[in-house]
Amino acid sequence: MKSIVVAASLVALVAGSNSAPAAAQSAATELVGPPSSAGEAVRTGPLPARLSLAQAMEEADARSPRVVAAEAEVEAARGRQRQAGYRYNPTLNVDVENFAGTGPYSGLNGLETTVSVNQRLDIGGRRRSRMTLADAEFLAAKYKLEIARADLALDVRNQFATALAARDSLALARENEARARELVRVAQAMVDTGNEPPLRAFRANAALVQATAELRTAEAEERTARRSLAALLGSSVPPAELMEGDMWVAPETVDSLATLDVRLAETEKLIAEARLQGQRADGRLDPSVGFGVRQLRDTGDRALIANVSVPLPVFDRNRGNISAAKSDVAAAIARRENAVVNAQAEIANAQAELEAAEARLAALEGSGIEQAREGVRLAELSYRAGKSSLVEYIDAQQAYAATQAELIAARQARAEARAILSRQAAADGDADHQP
């Protein structure tokens, strides 16, 4: 029994040195990534009746299941990172010999007991490779969380811009329908006084039917846009009104090498390299050493024993896994280069689209929309005075409506280009948390 107590003490001593995860060592080499936030419960309940873009962004981050899932994956990677720091557990061996035999070994007369502890040594670098891999996977999980937030912010910005465009299109459709209705009244009055043939009244009524149909379509699209925005924010009840006073400004410059997608690709390359390191470590030999105590029955004495065991790499040297891991590294390098090219192209395209949209807006908001509005006013006066035809008046109205629609489309295009640039600049810090 004394030998068992001694061996148990040895096990406790070895286990104590192995039980604590190498948190301090892992922390010293932990890769630096985007800041992570503690997960919170998913928000429920109705959206604000009057919703701004900043509120929509905040509601989306608090309600989105994709953010909650990404946060859970970060915590899972944190657990694996902690687990990777543990060493191998020791093995307790208890050997009982020379009993239940014949002669002097019958019963327990010749019983001998040996208690030993074996410990596998990590001289091949398995633990270090596990820690390196876990650190890289934890960093990748944090980048995926930030990408989930950035993609969600991009979707919210685009859908908010779509909803604003639908709202403005609805206002334009109502204005066009009101003008068409007034045109019917004026045309009918001129037909009644003999200043216009009856055909002109039919033409005005046809224009009213078309304007009414466009109004119904705009009403449906506006409702659909608000419902889609509410669904994106995790609510079935859309906001009653959208406010646009807090529109964001796109960053002037965006470094393609600092984008979240490129950084994630670089981290995945580190993961592939760490797995290659681990496969190489698995191909090395890790001996196990042991020592213990043997109780000698004949003399009552005790003696120490020691042993060393080494696996023999006769059949498996892990060459296939090492070759596969090398190919994975090459693939990760190629994906990183592809991520850089895609980021550069997306940034350049968004900047070009933003410049084009701002140029269109400068022309339309400057003199374009005023000239179209003045053209409608002058065409109406001329028609009422009998100096121009109904067709010319309708053409002026349609030109004004087309200019207004172009203005709405340019504003939406500007918003979408800004959203893409903000998405690409999210790695600069808190860009994806700004309105």
Image (tube, rainbow, N blue to C red):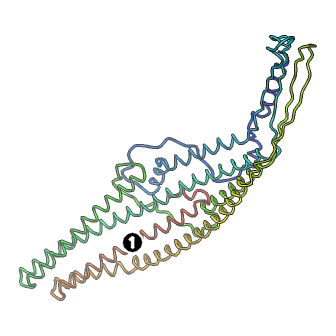
Q: Is residue 250 visible to the viewer in this orientation of the structure?
A: yes
Residue depicted at 10% across the width and 81% down the height: 190
Q: Position of residue 340 (x, y in %)?
A: 62, 67
Give the residue displayed 76% in from the left and 52% down from the top.
280
Circle 1 SS class: helix
Residue projecting furthest to the front = 102
Q: Residues within 10 Å of mark 1 (few under 14, many from 20)?
A: many
Determine which quarter of the picture holds residue 395. Answer: bottom left
Query: Which is more toward the observer, 3 or 295?
Result: 295
Q: Nearer the viewer, residue 412 or 268?
A: 268
Amino acid carrying label 1: it is: Ala
Res 433 seen here: no
User: Which one is in front, 216 or 23?
Assistant: 23
- Residue in the picture at 39% in, 63% down: 162
Residue shown at 36% from the left, 50% from the top: 49
The spot of residue 47 in percent (x, y) is 39, 48
Residue 300, percent across and down? Answer: 91, 13
On screen, residue 304 above or below 312: above
Residue that mark 1 sits on: 409
- Image quadrant occupied by the N terminus: top right
Q: Is residue 6 above or below residue 136?
A: above
Q: Which of the pair 80/125 is nearer the observer?
A: 125
Q: How many numbered tags mark residues here?
A: 1
Q: Quadrant of residue 289?
A: top right
Q: Position of residue 354 (x, y in %)?
A: 49, 73
